Amino acid sequence: MIQDIRNTRTIILNSGSTEIKKEEIRDYFHATYSLDEQLYETLKYDESFYIQAEPLRHPLIFYLGHTASFYINKLIIAKLIDQRINPGYESMFSVGVDEMSWDDLDESHYDWPTVAEVKAYRDKVRTVVDELITSTPLVMPITWDHLFWTIMMGIEHQRIHLETSSVIIRRLPIDHVRMLPLWEICPDTNPAPKNELMPVAGGRVNLGKSKDSPLYGWDNEFGQHQKDVWDFSASKYLVSNHEFLSFVKDKGYSKNEFWTDEGRRWVDFVKAEHPLFWIKKGDTYQLRTMVQIIEMPWDWPVEVNYLEAKAFCNWRGAEHDQPIRLPTEDEWYRLRDLHKIPDQPYWEKAPGNINLEHWASSCPVTRFRFGDFYDIIGNVWQWTETPITGFTGFKVHPFYDDFSTPTFDTRHNLIKGGSWISTGNEATRESRYSFRRHFFQHAGFRYIQSKQPLEDQQAMYENDSAVSQYCQAHYGEDYYTVENFPLKCAKMVLGYMIDRPKRKALDLGCAVGRSTFELAREFASVDGLDFSARFIRIAFQMKQKGSIHFELQEEGDIVSYHEKKLEIFGLEQFKDKVEFFQADASNLKPQFTGYDLILAANLIDRLTDPVKFLTTIHSRLNTNGLLVLTSPYTWLEEVTTKENWVGGIRKDGEPYTTLEGLKDILSHHFKMLDAPRDIEFVIRETRRKFQHTISQMTVWEKIN
């Protein structure tokens, strides 16, 4: 029975008879549940469950309840069940799963139930899920929107926590844990090998699952991603404890030049001098495994966080006068794919120290060979340089909307390859897991040498509320039958340009760029300018990548996630005619001149000196060029001092409107082409709150 629950494989979901598939899933569920419970049997005492061994996570009593309550919470959302078992537990054990920032410790007090109470709750959940698997009709194949996908979600989620809980157990006081036969560690150790860099041929990497994939996947695994990887060299072995010892002996933890700013702050905070699981003993070290302290196996892989791995790479590069870094996700996949390693459900025996098929610990870095390399998969996770984000086409699964998106913040780096306790989905080729860079997992690293530059990463989902609202206003759906404002402006402007030259246009106050792209349908080139770097960043991203991602507030803390693509609007083919710049409309650089059209939408009442703008803008236009202004004339003293208002004041005791002010100012160089026209626009703030505004458009032709 021990071997049965350890050596299991994730389910192939698109083939096989319904009867056999239901039994496979049922067996997989029970093996997972039992393995989870056997992990907690390593705790000697009930009080061991309440020790906060990992200061950035809850005590283990939380995780004992969490994996069970997760099933109920997701089955309720999926409407597979309509009755809770224990609403209090299903609330208590749902929040606070992920690690916190190292400098923002959680001091909250929780009134945890007893271990016996939580175990009794777990038994009830097991019965409910078993009965559901047995009674729910199954139609093959099982895909993203299938009822059984939610059951698989619960199982694979439980397998993730086998690993995270084992790391927390590894930090408990040693007298609170015990060795059991299921969790025997590797007995082998030898002198550590000398590491060296080996060549890896570059090539194209193709990542991302399709919705008809045969294996369960988390939302971040779906979509498409391609990358051409340059030739590089990679270390033959994972960095061993012995290899890392040189960095420790050289007092690498105290040498600022090897650490990133984030890494230096972390070292100063925790006072680290060596890896977390090393225990200083006289002139040497011991190693803490999950349930034992052993003499240091110098040929096992070192286990560190990203910050330590990065510092080691910088140190080694300086020692050998060569650029050394961690691999990117794409480079790790290139190394893996060159060795044609079978995926987990299809191997006869795990080709590496993974899936709990060998030991409940690391093993020598020389044990599992893949061509010229070792441990391409298994033993410990491998840190990469790549912060996790979604692939093109990423979509949130409706039943687990916060699995990936909170990590798309550039602060969670991907780990690849799996560890000895990585099972189920974690042990498949497509798995994509990440942690904060200061966090500890059963993770180590290999290093590479490459001339290919690293890409700057930005958070995938814009969460600045003002920017997100403009993303939606420019690229989202219409509300209350009010047409998209930047689109309507562009259409109306282009209507005035019939029989006029359309060589070059300027979109002033372009925000996130929709009208800029729309004008490029007919203009040879269009410059989009905005004072806000936040807005221009989004517009530039839309041009460069053809897509943007943002979150919208629904209500309170509930948000939704959105992706918008140029191709949806038929604008992809025009993006090369567009350029975006951050600029001040009242103080434009000389290069912004010679335009046939200038559109300044909802701009003038947001300028500190609109009069200066209006009296100089003619110099940027060609003769007979058009200046198009729109504005709701919402003058605010905190933006524009009253003496600079164009209108909305009393002049000589009489009302003086902005339109009158525009005529007085612009008449020296322009004539008005048409009567003013009103254009509505709507800004969505939340699901139930909208701003409805009416802007006035005036069109002016330059006459001198």
Image (cartoon, rainbow, N blue to C red):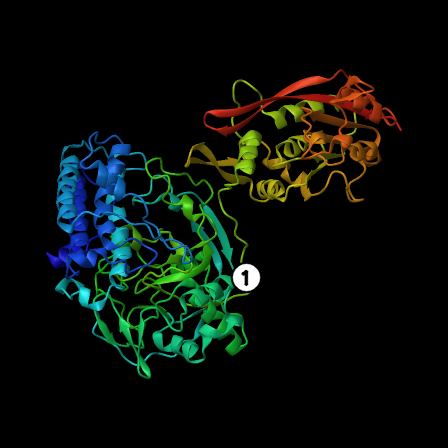
- Residue 421 relative to residue 184: left or right: right
Residue 638 figure quarter: top right
Task: Please provide percent x and percent y for residue 129.
Answer: 17, 39
Q: Nearer the viewer, residue 341 or 442?
A: 442
For image coordinates 67% across by 30% down, the residue present is 636
Count of numbered circles in the view: 1
- Residue 356 relative to residue 514: left or right: left
Q: Does dot 1 land on a helix, a strand or a loop?
A: loop
The amino acid on which the numbered mark 1 sits, given as a three-letter code, is Gln
Vertical comparison of 641 with 583: above or below: above
The image quadrant where one finds the N terminus is bottom left
The image quadrant where one finds the C terminus is top right
- Residue 568 relative to residue 70: left or right: right
Q: Looking at this rendering, what residue extends furthest in the front direction?
A: 653
For image coordinates 32% across by 64% down, the residue present is 380
One can see residue 284 in this view: yes
One can see residue 141 in this view: no
Q: Nearer the viewer, residue 293 or 548?
A: 293
For image coordinates 32% across by 50% down, the residue present is 108
Vertical comparison of 32 with 445: above or below: above
Task: Please provide percent x and percent y for residue 695.
Answer: 66, 22
Q: Looking at this rendering, what residue extends furthest in the left direction?
A: 1
For image coordinates 74% across by 38% down, the residue present is 585
Q: Residues within 10 Å of mark 1 (few under 14, many from 20)?
A: few
Q: Which residue was labeled with disc 1?
A: 452
